[in-house]
Amino acid sequence: MRYTLLSWNVNGIRSIYQKGFVDWLRITEPDILCLQETKAQPEQLPDELLSVADYYAFFNAAERKGYSGVAVYSKLQPQKVEKALRIEHFDREGRILILHYPEFTLINVYFPNGQASDERLSYKLDFYAEFLDYVDRLNNAGYNLIICGDVNTAHREIDLSHPQENSIISGFLPIERAWIDKFLSYGFFDTFRLFNNEPGNYTWSSPLTHARECNIGWRIDYFFVNRRFLDRVVSASILANVPGSDHCPVGLEIQI
């Protein structure tokens, strides 16, 4: 069986709901859709978002309303769902959903943004470290892993339009890029780069200009898999023409 997975930072699930999100989901019909930066508690959502036909829906919201949060819509019923790294100061921000299926474990994660302050950059780097420890334990325990979400860092110079100008900005700092190098060295693979090593492929563009129309942006949204799941990957993509957010969805097709 082939399955299509999509991951999308929606920059507010209530916002994209007003822009036709449910219709888009019904037309697109991914087997699993992972959302980041939902910015809503489940009780703030309309029934049409809580219960979409043919999908199981899972939410992890931040304690702070209107902030962070992740969600998953899945046609496949997971065996178990977890919502925490079990580290309180990270878990209160609602940044992760872990869904265990018979053939793989899917981790939907919204990594912190470090641009606001040195304190938030430190928080981001601490989250990176704890997350790597967590997935490394799963990897060593024999899990098939798919990891997706907004990593909030562009890995290489080809992953953003203006690398030199942004080399001192969080999101392209050497220490952040080095973490992605370290993460990959633990046996994980950036699936998009398995199929496409060209520049000019971005997943986020500034909403304050016509950056997306001019193809100016950053590739900061990813699907990763571990080595033992690598031969299940069929294709990876960026859905650059999907409107509604300052990010666009990224896709992964797998064969089980």
Image: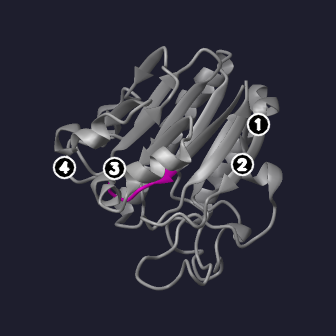
Which three-letter amino acid code belongs to the residue tagged 4?
Answer: Lys
Residue located beneath label 1 in the image: 233
User: From the image, which quarter does the N terminus lie in?
Assistant: top right
N-terminal of the pair, mark 1 or mark 4, is 4
Query: Distance of mark 4 from mark 3, alpha carbons?
Result: 10 Å
- Secondary structure at numbered mark 2: strand
- Disc 4 or 2, which lies upstream in sequence? 4
Q: Residues within 10 Å of mark 1 (few under 14, many from 20)?
A: some
Residue hosting label 4? 65
Q: From the image, state whether disc 4 or disc 3 is nearer to you.
A: 3
Callout 4: SS: loop
Precedes in sequence: disc 4 or disc 3: 3
Q: Is 138 situated left or right of 231 in this image?
A: left
Residue 224 in the image: above or below residue 250: above
- Region in magenta: 8-12
Tell me, yes or no, whether the two marked residues, 1 and 2, touch with CB atoms within 8 Å: yes
Q: Secondary structure at mark 1?
A: strand
Numbered circles on residues, count? 4
Look at the image and tell me whether residue 80 can be seen: yes
**Residue located at (59% from left, 83% from top):** 165
User: Can you identify the residue that label 3 sits on?
Assistant: 38
Q: Which mark is residue 43?
A: none
Q: Quadrant of the C terminus?
A: top right
* Residue 27 placement, left or right of 71: right
The amino acid type found where label 3 is placed reads: Thr
CB atoms of marks 4 and 2 within 8 Å = no
- Specify which label sits upstream in the sequence, 1 or 3: 3
Reading the image, the residue beneath label 2 is 236
The kind of residue on which mark 2 rests is: Ala
Predominant secondary structure, magenta span: loop
Q: Quadrant of residue 156?
A: bottom right
